[in-house]
Image (spheres, helix red, strand yellow):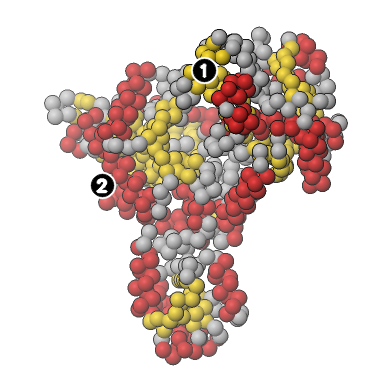
């Protein structure tokens, strides 16, 4: 007998050699029906895996947020899709087909891209394979035999040849189809219930533009038809909220191939929103004694060698430009510049904390395949700041930053967010500056600060900056994605590398600590988040056009122009639609543009010097004087 420790802390005694599925049945028949794989001492295994010794066991299902359980389900379905493609297109060569966060994909080498008809036929063939309920069998081979088995599949042979000597080479077989795979997989194809092919695209083999372009098919599967329908509804909602779609419809930003990938251009409407955001956060920071600076977007390579970015970050930087006796590079971040601004003069302990802020343009060497609208760009503008503190000030100043973050989130109405303590990965120290003592000090101090501040947080290894741990605020987007917006980082390294000092109360030189922080992150990504969060219907204070005046006929134009000037002088962002169009058309267009308020002007309004108001949210809300409307708008303006 062996002892199996379960997730809830209970221990089961079972026969040695029992499978994970047999353990699941011992717990409950319901668990056995829903189980997709197991995790034995941290390693994911098939349900058929035989337990040979005492172990910790987690049994995964498709339910809730169990990503490992879903991946086993989706990975199994990816093999079904590859089998269907091979049946319909025998000449196709198979590459890789992993499960991803939302479904799976498989890459194929075929003569021409898959058409919609091809994808419909592949989906039907997948359903046939599921109905056949083919047993899925796992087996392993030595390297030479594995290569012989896969000799007609060049991409699989390449993967096998790249495996280190001695590593197990496993395969999964279902009917007439065998694939190289580490697993895990379900016991048979019949365990899959519903499938849907979602899209297809080109994808370079192994993600390199130097390799051949393959055809990738994305798909998803579920245990219930209702779950598939929910997912399709979710995808449609995501499509409707896509900031690229809304950005085009509302003329917020554009891209052009002559400018380049990942380099969006803000149109007047988008520039208005960005200007409001920039003024909003700058005003908040100035009120908290931040001193704003401007620093160049270029720097000598030696600056980044001094900071350590060159050793840890150069792959994400644009190539060096050689100019006379200098090597210049576009900056990926502006921390080093601010270190030099601090060092520009001698500081006393009485001067600290010193808060240096900047709306800084930075550049990242993103591949063309990874750039996306405003969300992922090659040039970005960061709401950045660096606070120089004494060791004794760390906790209070860090607390001030957290309060600023919470204040901003309240203004924007954000409430679904969590705090993540991002630590280094102790098993992959190459990514980080090599100083164990510094890391242990910084991580333990940050953990202690968060605990004392009463902040609920979870820890994540491998998410730290190369120079220190950080607090990341993870926020849920309108379509359920978990992204980082605000970040606050504790840094003992850069003050050391730049030899920063302040004169302490004892008259001696001491080393400050730097707190890096970004409240809105980059304005580009923050705006993409807001577009999707509000679905383009920005609150009054952020809307690029707050009011649109709609005269019914040309006879009402003069009053409409006077009205526009009156509102404009009060700082209201107002437009006049003076086109010779029917009023119904003008209203519909303003609604599509999601303008918060429309003022409709006809004979009655001209005579009484009033306005008929239509609200984006409430519809027609009656007639009122211009003064009363401006008072109402002022209240809405400050109702963040």
The residue where tag 2 is placed is: 289
Q: Residue at x 31, y 51 (%)?
A: 284
Residue 624: percent from left, percent from top: 40, 81
Q: Quadrant of the C terminus?
A: bottom left
Q: Is residue 124 left or right of residue 615?
A: right
* Mark found first going from the N terminus, 2 or 1: 1
Q: Say which element carries label 1.
A: strand
Query: Which quarter of the picture shows residue 2?
Result: top right
Q: Residue at x 71, y 40 (%)?
A: 195
Above or below 124: residue 567: below
Q: Residue at x 76, y 14 (%)?
A: 146
Residue 521: percent from left, percent from top: 43, 44
Residue 290: percent from left, percent from top: 29, 45
- Choose between 247 and 422: the one closer to the eye: 422
Q: Residue at x 66, y 39 (%)?
A: 222
Q: Quadrant of the N terminus?
A: top right
**Residue 85 — which label?**
none
How many numbered callouts?
2
Mark-to-mark CA distance, 2 and 1:
61 Å
> Viewer-nearest of labels 2 and 1?
1
Q: Say which element carries label 2.
A: loop
Crowdedness of circle 2 by 10 Å Cα count: few (<14), some, many (20+)? Answer: few
Pointer 2 and pointer 1: residues touching (CB < 8 Å)? no
The residue where tag 1 is placed is: 12
Is any part of residue 389 visible from this angle?
no
Residue 97: percent from left, percent from top: 70, 30
- Choose between 402 and 419: the one closer to the eye: 419
């Amino acid at each position: 007998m062996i002892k199996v420790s379960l997730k809830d802390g209970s221990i089961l005694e079972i026969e040695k050699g029992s499978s994970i599925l047999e353990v699941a049945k011992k717990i409950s028949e319901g668990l056995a029906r829903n189980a997709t794989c197991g995790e034995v001492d941290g390693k994911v295994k098939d349900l058929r895996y035989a337990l040979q010794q005492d172990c910790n066991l987690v049994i995964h299902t498709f339910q809730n947020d169990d990503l490992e359980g879903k991946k086993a389900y989706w990975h199994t379905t990816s093999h079904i899709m590859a089998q269907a493609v091979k049946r319909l297109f025998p000449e196709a060569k198979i590459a890789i087909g992993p499960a991803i966060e939302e479904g799976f994909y498989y890459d194929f080498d075929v003569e021409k891209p898959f058409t919609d008809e091809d994808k419909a036929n592949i989906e039907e063939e997948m359903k046939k394979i599921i109905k056949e309920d083919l047993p899925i069998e796992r087996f392993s081979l030595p390297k030479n035999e594995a290569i012989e088995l896969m000799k007609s599949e060049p991409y699989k042979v390449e993967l096998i040849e790249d495996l280190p000597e001695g590593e197990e080479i496993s395969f999964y077989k279902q009917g007439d189809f065998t694939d190289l795979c580490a697993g895990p997989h379900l016991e048979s194809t019949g365990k899959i219930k519903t499938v849907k092919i979602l899209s297809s695209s080109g994808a370079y083999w192994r993600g390199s533009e130097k390799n051949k372009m393959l055809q990738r098919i994305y798909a998803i599967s579920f245990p219930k038809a209702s779950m598939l329908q929910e997912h399709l509804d979710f995808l449609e909602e995501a499509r409707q909220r896509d900031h690229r779609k809304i950005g085009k419809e509302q003329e917020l930003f554009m891209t052009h191939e002559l400018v380049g990938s990942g380099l969006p251009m803000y149109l007047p409407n988008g520039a208005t929103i960005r200007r409001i955001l920039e003024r909003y956060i700058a005003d908040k920071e100035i009120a908290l004694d931040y001193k704003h600076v401007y620093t160049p977007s270029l720097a000598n390579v030696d600056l980044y060698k001094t900071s350590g970015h060159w050793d840890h970050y150069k792959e994400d930087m644009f190539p060096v430009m050689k100019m006379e006796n200098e090597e210049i590079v576009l900056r990926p971040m502006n921390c080093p510049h601010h270190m030099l601004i601090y060092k520009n003069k001698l500081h006393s302990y009485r001067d600290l904390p010193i808060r240096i802020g900047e709306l800084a343009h930075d550049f990242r060497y993103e591949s063309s395949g990874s750039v996306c609208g405003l969300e992922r760009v090659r040039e970005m503008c960061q709401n950045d700041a660096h606070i120089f503190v004494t060791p004794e000030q760390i906790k209070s100043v860090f607390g001030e930053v957290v309060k600023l973050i919470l204040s901003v989130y309240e203004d924007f109405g954000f409430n679904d967010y969590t705090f993540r303590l991002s630590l280094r990965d102790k098993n992959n120290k190459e990514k980080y500056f090599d100083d164990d003592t510094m890391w242990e000090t910084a991580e333990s101090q940050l953990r202690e600060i968060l605990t004392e501040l009463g902040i609920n947080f979870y820890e994540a290894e491998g998410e730290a900056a190369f120079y220190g741990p950080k607090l990341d605020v993870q926020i849920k987007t309108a379509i359920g994605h978990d992204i980082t917006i605000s970040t606050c980082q504790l840094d003992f390294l850069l003050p050391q590398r730049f030899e920063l000092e302040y004169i302490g109360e004892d008259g001696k030189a001491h080393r400050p600590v730097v707190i890096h922080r970004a409240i809105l992150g980059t304005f580009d990504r923050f705006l993409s988040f807001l577009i999707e969060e509000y679905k383009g219907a920005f609150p009054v204070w952020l809307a690029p056009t707050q009011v649109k005046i709609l005269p019914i006929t040309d006879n009402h134009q003069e009053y409409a122009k006077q009205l526009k000037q009156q509102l404009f002088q009060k700082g209201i962002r107002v437009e006049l639609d003076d086109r010779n169009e029917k009023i119904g058309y003008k209203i519909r267009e303003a609604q599509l543009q999601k303008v918060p308020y429309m003022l409709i002007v006809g004979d009655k309004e001209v005579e009484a010097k009033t306005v008929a108001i239509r609200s984006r949210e409430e519809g027609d809300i009656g007639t009122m004087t211009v003064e009363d409307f401006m008072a109402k708008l002022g209240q809405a303006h400050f109702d963040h």
